[in-house]
Amino acid sequence: MILYPAIDLKDGQAVRLVHGDMDQATVFNDDPAAQARAFVEAGCEWLHLVDLNGAFAGTPVNAAPVEAILASCDVPAQLGGGIRDMATIEMWLSKGLARVILGTVAVENPDLVREAARAFPGHVAVGIDARGGKVATKGWATETDVDATDLARSFEDAGVAAIIYTDINRDGAMGGPNIPATDSLAKAVSIPVIASGGVSSLADLTALKATGTIAGAISGRALYDGAIDLAAALQALKG
């Protein structure tokens, strides 16, 4: 199981939110590229980046720090937030991003996801963010009546590289991930599923790995707070 350290970008800084609330942002590093390099030096194999402003704006806002991270780190990175058309997908992949994460458009324009996955095999992931099993879009600000599992199943034949499943009520709250819901989603599709939201201890990571169904886990606040030692966690997950 791959551990993805998260760098959430707001106003050019690396922050963490609680439950996706932009008013509850804690700044952890005002140099996101330095933060990324620290994660790489600890041994991570991937980076997970989120343009928080972009998720609300619907267009890239924190492009400069993302580009700085891509220029200074030699591990692959995936990015979500504000990526809602083919031109933006092409732009990011041309700059060296390994994987784009499509969230809002997966609900509003699923044909774009399919087109992008065909055009860029292995480089397109779907982000499914849910409250109580129902998908939320536009930086989690818009509730829908779309069922998370139904949405995931709808892309079964699309060729997407991964599904990133976030339980919004767990995100940033350090209360542990929603393992049953994530495991259930992973069993419902053949697409690799990455868990996000609430991963706050080594025990959480080992429990996710123990399901045997979950391909990866994203953690942010726990790494910044020191609740998870990245190097130790990476070593444990190799076992």
Image: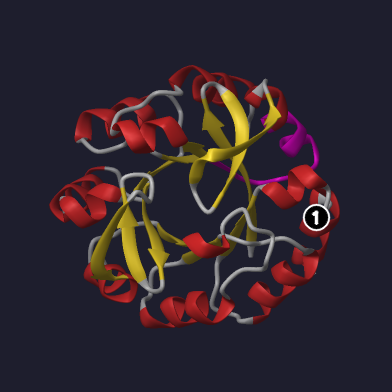
Question: Residue 88 or 176: which is nearer the viewer?
Answer: 176
Q: Is residue 41 magenta?
A: yes
The answer to whether residue 149 shows anywhere in this view is yes
Which of the pair 71/101 is nearer the observer? 101
- The quadrant of the image that shows the N terminus is bottom right
Give the left or right position of residue 24, taking residue 117 as reference: right
Q: Which residue is mark 1?
A: 228
Magenta stretch bounds: 36-48
Q: Nearer the viewer, residue 173 or 109?
A: 173
Q: Residue at x 34, y 48 (%)?
A: 141
- In the picture, measured across the screen, residue 210 lies left or right of residue 49, that is right
Compared with 5, 110 (above or below) is below
Give the vertical position of 89 relative to 231 (above or below): above
As helix, strand or loop, the secondary structure at mark 1 comes to: loop
> Tell me, what colour scheme is on the image?
secondary structure
Task: Locate residue 148, reporting x and y percent.
Answer: 33, 70
Q: For the image shown, how many numbered marks are present on the structure?
A: 1
Q: Is residue 225 left or right of residue 69?
A: right
- The quadrant the C terminus occupies is bottom right
Q: Is residue 43 visible?
A: no
Image quarter of residue 84: top left
Q: Amino acid at mark 1?
A: Ile
Within 10 Å of disc 1 (Cα), the crowding (few <14, some 14-19, many 20+) is many
Relative image position of residue 59 (x, y in whole percent): 30, 29
